[in-house]
Image (cartoon, coloured by chain):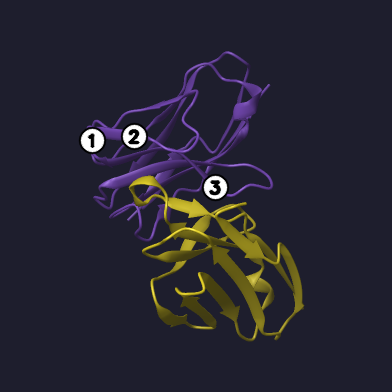
Chain colours: A purple, B yellow
Amino acid sequence: NAGVTQTPKFQVLKTGQSMTLQCAQDMNHEYMSWYRQDPGMGLRLIHYSVGAGITDQGEVPNGYNVSRSTTEDFPLRLLSAAPSQTSVYFCASSWGPNQPQHFGDGTRLSIL
Amino acid sequence: KNEVEQSPQNLTAQEGEFITINCSYSVGISALHWLQQHPGGGIVSLFMLSSGKKKHGRLIATINIQEKHSSLHITASHPRDSAVYICAVGGGSQGNLIFGKGTKLSVKP
């Protein structure tokens, strides 16, 4: 099993550009989530989904969009990149929000 | 005040030492998680517990619900234990996890 696969691993963008971070899981988990990790701060929830077709905002949703058309995939879209979105992004999946999380390897994103 | 507080922030130990990392939280929870983030960045779940104690190899996690406190112990520490250890509680909206800032552990040979 691949688990949770995130692509790309690294990305550099210019301010104002848009891009999509990909996340796929092969464990048939209903719950998927996106976090950002910044120096000196804990992981913060951006958006989450409790199943295909259902998404909701987390703690820091501004500037990001998500969709969940299938159980497997949960892409995160940056609409117009800003330097404040420079961060490491993690996708995770699990059987529920308060169940052991399976994390992807992360995407290191820099916005210039 | 942060809802999840970990201490210490940084910890350096000699190989073989017994290590304790603490986590205190201020919200009502249904479960507490301990995770490990390797130097390369990957994050793995170590424990999920809602009461008592769990043990896996040299790692032991305990929780005291009344005192809103959990500890992660590492016995006979080894340099490969060097990592950031993260505490998280299921207390956010919809039961989402709230994370501590992590404890960076370095074990010297």
In the picture, the quarter occupied by the N terminus of chain A is: bottom left
Q: x%, y% of residue B92? A: 42, 49
Q: x%, y% of residue B99? A: 53, 54
How packed mark 2 is, by other alpha carbons closer than 10 Å (few <14, some 14-19, many 20 or more), is: some
Task: From the image, tell me which residue sits under label 2.
Answer: A56
Q: Is residue B106 above or below residue B18?
A: above
**Same chain for the residues under marks 1 and 3 in the image:** yes
Looking at numbered disc 3 in the image, what kind of residue is underneath it?
Leu
Q: x%, y% of residue A54? A: 25, 34
Task: From the image, tell me which residue sits under label 3.
Answer: A43
The reply to whether dot 1 and dot 3 touch (C-beta < 8 Å) is no
Helix, strand or loop at mark 3? loop
The reply to whether dot 1 and dot 2 touch (C-beta < 8 Å) is no
How packed mark 3 is, by other alpha carbons closer than 10 Å (few <14, some 14-19, many 20 or more), is: many
In the picture, the quarter occupied by the C terminus of chain A is: top right
Helix, strand or loop at mark 1? loop
Left or right: residue B86 versus residue B39 is: left
Given residues A73 and B2, the one toward you in this image is B2
The answer for how far apart the CA atoms under marks 1 and 3 are is: 25 Å
Tell which circle, 1 or 2, labels the residue nearer the N-terminal end: 2
The answer for how far apart the CA atoms under marks 1 and 2 are is: 15 Å
Identity of the residue drawn at 50% across and 17% down: A18
Task: From the image, tell me which residue sits under label 1.
Answer: A70
Judge depth for marks 1 and 3 and give the one in front.
3
Chain to which the residue tagged by mark 2 belongs: A
Judge depth for marks 1 and 2 and give the one in front.
2
Chain to which the residue tagged by mark 3 belongs: A
Looking at numbered disc 1 in the image, what kind of residue is underneath it?
Thr
Name the residue furthest top. A16
Identity of the residue drawn at 46% across and 64% down: B33
Left or right: residue B12 versus residue A52 is: right
Chain to which the residue tagged by mark 1 belongs: A
